[in-house]
Amino acid sequence: MAFAPGNMTEVHQPQTFDAVLGGQSIAPAGSVVLGGLEGLRRRLRQGKVEERIAALWDCQNYGQKGLDLLIRALSDRSRKVQRVAYKILRDRSEVQAQIALEAVCTFPLFEPITALEGHDAGITAIAIGARQFRYRADQQIVVSASRDGIVQVWDVEQKEPFLTLDAESFVYAIAIDSETDSFTILGENQHRQAWSFRNGQPIAPSLEKLRTIASVTVVGDRQYMLSGSGNSIKIWELSTGKELASLYGHTRPVTAIALSDDHQHLVSGSEDRTVRLWGI
């Protein structure tokens, strides 16, 4: 029980920092929730988004039943709640958790991670991969090309290009070859050029087929399609034609997108001259 400020009128609702019996009322932010598992279930069922997210972390104190609640939260009505549940379960070792994650289409949960800025013109093609090292962890890289023919190779962690090259041509497509530590571009008149990541020197281009529709990609055994649409990236379920989600961050039309091999990251390029990295 609490009293309203300035008088002794009883207020029969919990206030901030009150202790609340779980299962009775929804707790304000900052209060202590009693009632154990039943109170936790009520918070996940009826709480606001912030309260449901806070409850997800408490699920880790309830063993198998808490794990079941975390898995159920993957279907929460809020993408924010789904995303936090996914992140927590990703660090769990139980087989049940890993099986549940495998069934999730992660693309609608993607959010902006970083923006790479340095091009002087809109982006025309993009690729994401890894630069191979013998004695240390691989370096995640992005290769992007802009309308002026400039190709930049980015160290994603440092947010800086470590190679800048002039293709002297409009670039339609880029492919990264992790085995040879190189990348190939497709320019005008089907002309191919390739460079080594190690030293930036030209090498014989790969004959690998390059994807020339830069702003659309189909993934998951043709289950999903990701496409640039105006200033956003849309995720579609191909079997139903349903739009699952839109990702926002660019300020001008999205002109190029690409997925990492493990589908954990998406990169996009835009007429706003930026490259953006997305993930969970």
Image (spheres, helix red, strand yellow):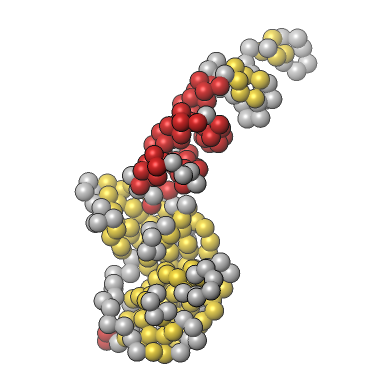
Determine the residue located farthest toward the left in the rendered image.
239
Residue 195 is left or right of residue 135, and the answer is: left
Q: Residue at x 33, y 77 (%)?
A: 172
Q: Is residue 163 left or right of residue 215?
A: right
Hey, which quadrant is residue 20 in on the image? top right
| Image quadrant assignment for residue 127 | bottom left
Residue 133 in the image, given as x and y percentages of width and height? 50, 75
Asked if residue 168 can be seen in this view, the reply is no
* 148 w.r.t. 117: above or below: below
In the rendered structure, the answer to whether residue 25 lies left or right of residue 259 reads right
- Residue at the outermost top position: 9
Q: Residue at x 44, y 52 (%)?
A: 110
Q: How many marks?
A: 0
- 129, 168: nearer the viewer: 129
Q: Nearer the viewer, residue 123 or 111?
A: 111
Q: Position of residue 140 (x, y in %)?
A: 49, 68
* Residue toward you, 64 or 178: 64
The quadrant the N terminus occupies is: top right
Q: x%, y% of residue 228?
A: 35, 61
Query: Relative to 48, is 168 above or below?
Result: below
Query: What residue sits 34% from the left and 89% below the top?
Result: 204
The image shows residue 250, relative to residue 78, as above or below, that is below
**Residue at horizontal 52 percent and vertical 68 percent from the top:** 137
Judged left or right of residue 218, residue 180 is right
Residue 64 appearing in the image? yes
